[in-house]
Image (tube, rainbow, N blue to C red):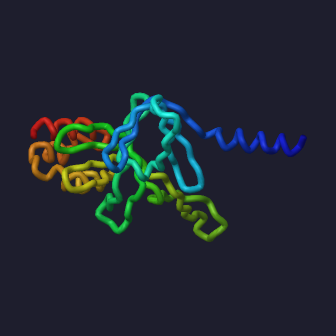
Amino acid sequence: MKFYSILLCLLLSSNSYAQKFNGYVITDQNVKINGHLTLLKDAQGKKISVNDGKSYFVRTFYIHDLKSYAYKKDTFMVLPAFYPFGSDYLAEDVVAEVRISKGKLKLYYGELPDFYPYTYTTVPTGSPNGVGVTAHKKRCFTYIIQDDESLYGVQKGDDFIKSISIPLADNEILMKRIKNKELKYKDMVEIITLYNAGH
């Protein structure tokens, strides 16, 4: 009896992360498959099972092997590896929500895996000066811009103008508004919409 209880617990826990939605996947060969999606995860990563309602078998894809996928009202793009901030950090397996999909520039929003900018706080200590500094890792969610050739990460704060100036360099009017702080990081959807309208 104990063995069956353990087995039942394992089965329930292994399926507890499964989420099911209607949607589609686009394979790396540009094949679109509509159907009932089940989002799963195993030791090798996140994956999606697709039941198109026409076949007797279910096709399963690891997310990093897809070009994009969509479920419910949200569409997600699986971005190719890129260097988001002109540094030596390589962002791989980024799954980003699509915010703007049409126009010269595309806009996504997602987490950069394994990129943890540190934040620092002062804390009381037993040292002579009475305070110390503690570093905390912070998950990095950011906007990502795509043009015909590259992907660019958009940084918040002091580096915002620098990080956005490369993909928007050919629109002086828009860049002037950004430099004058009329448009900020929080206005990214408006910024890319305005840019695309001018092209």
- Looking at the picture, how far across and down is residue 18, in whole percent? 58, 38
Q: Residue at x 19, y 51 (%)?
A: 148
**Observer-nearest residue: 132 or 83?**
83
Image position of 131 with respect to 182: above or below = below
**Which corner quadrant of the image does residue 33 belong to?**
top left
**Observer-nearest residue: 21 or 164?**
21
Q: Residue at x 76, y 41 (%)?
A: 9
**Which corner quadrant of the image does residue 181 belong to?**
top left
- Looking at the picture, how far across and down is residue 94, in whole percent? 40, 52
**Observer-nearest residue: 28 or 12?**
28
Image side of residue 26 versus residue 147, left or right: right
- Looking at the picture, how far across and down is residue 116, in whole percent? 47, 58
Q: Would you say residue 141 is visible in this rendering?
A: no
- Looking at the picture, how far across and down is residue 7, in whole percent? 78, 44
Residue furthest toward the right? 1
Q: Would you say residue 146 is visible in this rendering?
A: yes
Q: Quadrant of the N terminus?
A: top right
Q: Residue at x 35, y 59 (%)?
A: 81
Residue furthest toward the bottom? 128
Image position of 28 with respect to 35: above or below = below
